[in-house]
């Protein structure tokens, strides 16, 4: 039986080798057609080469991002769980634990456009139209405070966008500077003794012995004057609150999610929603008597992590005073 198999294999191999050569030395396949090459040739270069015609606004991008991207990256591009953060991290690259985002780290906007166009949304890649990609990238820029809300990104103004870390990279000179050293690398018994000089930094696993209570930085708080409720402001707040729905629910039938239910929060003591596990710092603030007045809520919504260090809130804060006032008015309306 073994000899039979060997003979059969040899015969099959002889037939393959004797077959006509259609493409290349191996006789496999055929040359790719131009349209087939074009389907794979999607890359966009830093100088804008490869960008298709089209445009997209920040406002359109906000809606598309909420539908296509927010489930992983958060409504504010702040990241959900272990999914990547796309916004924030300004001036952190020289820290021990830098936050590398589109705004803080990526030197070329083309990398953002190219990646979104090729790979997103997760599980349904390359289903976005060019205008949708432009709009999403515009919203990511807005989330990093790099453009205004009325900005429209297009192929024509693409290179006008200044990325903060554009000059943060150097040419790779390792072939000249280091490869010769690598070839002389020691492979065994290189040192008499080995000592541990540094340890990896592990985040969010070491309990804090003390919780710093709520100390709002004066220069980080947007002062919002309490306003009488009106239908227009409440309606604006309901629309703005869509950014919060990934974590918070309100109204009848609301349930705790990543964040607690917010129905009735205006004027209520902090940390009192049944069934929700608050962070240590929030529990400590509640114990100290924090009440969510309009002023406290506006301070918290401006920059949560500055207002309360150690908070579970992952988004960086609302940028506009009007948005904060509108959300608070909307939350107030739910309590009436």
Image (cartoon, rainbow, N blue to C red):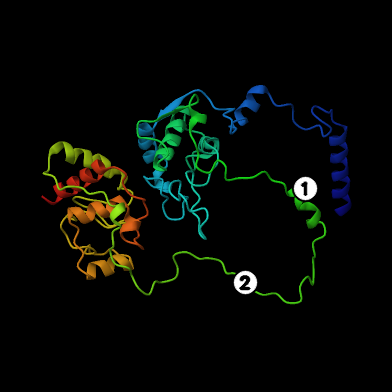
Spatial CA span between label 1 and label 2: 29 Å
Callout 1: SS:
helix
Residue denoted by label 1:
176
| Residue 258 visible, this angle | no
> Which residue is the extreme one toward the front?
219
On the picture, is 306 further left or further right than 299?
A: right
Residue occupying image coordinates x 50% and y 38%: 116
Is 4 placed left or right of 334 in the picture? right
Query: Position of 283 compared to 1: left or right?
Result: left
Quadrant in which residue 325 is drawn: top left
- Which residue occupies 58% across, 27% down? 50
Residue 263: x %, y % from top left: 19, 53
Viewer-side residue, 29 vs 19 = 29
Residue that label 2 marks:
197
Residue 124 tag number: none
| Circles 1 and 2 in contact, beta carbons < 8 Å | no
């Amino acid at each position: 039986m073994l000899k039979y198999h060997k003979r059969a294999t040899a015969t099959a191999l002889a037939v393959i080798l004797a077959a006509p050569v259609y493409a290349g030395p191996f006789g496999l396949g055929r040359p790719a057609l131009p349209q087939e090459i074009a389907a794979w040739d999607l890359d966009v270069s830093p100088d804008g080469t490869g960008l298709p015609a089209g445009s997209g606004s920040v406002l359109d991008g906000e809606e598309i991002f909420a539908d296509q991207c927010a489930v992983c990256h958060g409504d504010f591009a702040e990241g959900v769980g272990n999914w990547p953060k796309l916004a924030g991290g300004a001036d952190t690259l020289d820290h021990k634990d830098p936050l590398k985002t589109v705004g803080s780290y990526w030197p070329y906007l083309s990398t953002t456009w190219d990646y979104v166009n090729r790979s997103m949304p997760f599980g349904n890649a390359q289903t976005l139209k060019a205008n949708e990609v432009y709009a999403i990238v515009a919203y990511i820029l807005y989330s990093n405070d790099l453009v205004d809300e009325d900005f429209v990104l297009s192929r024509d103004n693409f290179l006008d966008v200044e990325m903060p870390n554009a000059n943060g990279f150097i040419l790779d000179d390792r072939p000249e500077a280091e490869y010769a050293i690598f070839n002389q690398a020691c492979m065994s018994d290189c040192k008499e003794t080995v000592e541990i000089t540094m340890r990896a930094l592990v985040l969010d696993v070491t309990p804090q012995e003390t919780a710093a209570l709520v100390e709002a930085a004066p220069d980080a708080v947007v002062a919002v004057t309490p306003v009488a409720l009106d239908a227009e402001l409440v309606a604006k707040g309901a629309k703005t609150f869509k950014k919060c729905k990934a974590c918070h629910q309100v109204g009848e039938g609301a349930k705790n999610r990543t964040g607690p239910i917010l129905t009735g929060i205006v004027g209520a003591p902090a940390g009192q929603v049944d069934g929700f596990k608050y962070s240590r710092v929030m529990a400590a603030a509640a114990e100290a008597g924090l009440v969510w007045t309009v002023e406290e809520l506006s301070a918290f919504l401006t920059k949560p992590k500055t207002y309360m260090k150690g908070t579970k809130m992952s988004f960086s804060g609302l940028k506009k005073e009007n948005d904060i006032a509108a959300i608070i008015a909307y939350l107030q309306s739910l309590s009436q």
